[in-house]
Image: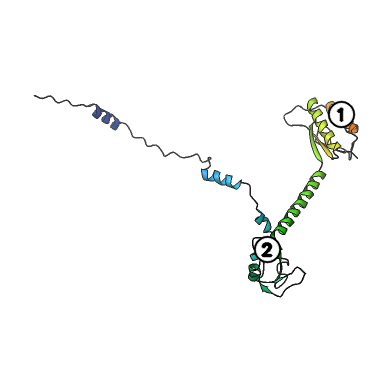
Amino acid sequence: MQRVSVSVRPLLRATASAGRPHVCLPPSRAFGTSPSWSAVDHRRAAGKLQIVTIDDKLAQFNLDEMIDTRQVRVKTADGKISSPIDLRQVLKSIDRTTSHVLQLSKSGEHEFAIVQVVERANLIKQIKEKETAQRRVQHAQKEKRPKQIELNWAISSNDLQLKLRQMEDFLRKGKKVELLLASKRRQRKASTEEAEALLKTLREKIQEVGAAEISPMEGAILRQATMTVKIS
């Protein structure tokens, strides 16, 4: 008789697996507090620096097709004003790469806008001159603002020497200086004697530099106080 060998191990494994309960795992998901990539990309895009071109700056003028009326009156080099003419005709008569038609009159001021043919280079020059003037005004306003130096009533000796050098440097450059005195949180509180000694040191240095307090000290000792000094 022929012997037949039968393996029962896979059957046992299948039976054992069938006896175990089947566990369904929930689908994985990101935490609600984690932003999606699209949100991150959106924030990055919003934070990019805006690049302003010369054409963007020229948009402050009413030029070419942006002129209010389709019929215009052209101001010539000798100051004369032409009869109404179609704007498209004026635009066709100029080199659009080097020239523009500029509206001189205000919007709604005339039935036909008064315009003039101008060189693009001259408009760019006007813009640069205006920006230079604005920067000068901003610089002058910044220079008028007093320089501020913050000091802790319980300031260390080394830090005080640094602040005194800063004050002297500003004063010798003709700047007005505001000394802002206050106690810092979570730091040692100065005693009345220390605060009075600090004021004495400051006033001695102010006198040494040749400056003076231009107004009485505002505030109170060991509280917030401001001293304003300048070389007269």
Which image quadrant: the N terminus? top left
* Residue 153 on image: x %, y %: 80, 30
Q: In the rendered image, which residue does mark 2 sit on?
A: 100
State the residue at coordinates (52%, 43%): 37
Tag 1: amino acid: Thr
Does residue 156 appear in this view? no
Front of the two marks 2 and 1: 2
Tell me the residue at 80%/25% (across/down).
157
> Is residue 158 in view from this perspective?
yes
Left or right: where 70 falls relative to 197 = left
> How far apart are the alpha carbons under marks 2 and 1?
66 Å
Circle 1: element type:
helix
Q: Position of residue 46 (x, y in %)?
A: 60, 47
- Residue at the extreme left: 1
Label 2 neighbourhood size at 10 Å, few (<14), some (14-19), many (20+)?
many
Q: Position of residue 168 (x, y in %)?
A: 84, 33
Relative vertical location of residue 201 with respect to residue 56 in this rendering, above or below: above
Q: Quadrant of residue 15?
A: top left
Q: Position of residue 18 (x, y in %)?
A: 28, 32
Q: Which residue is mark 1?
A: 201
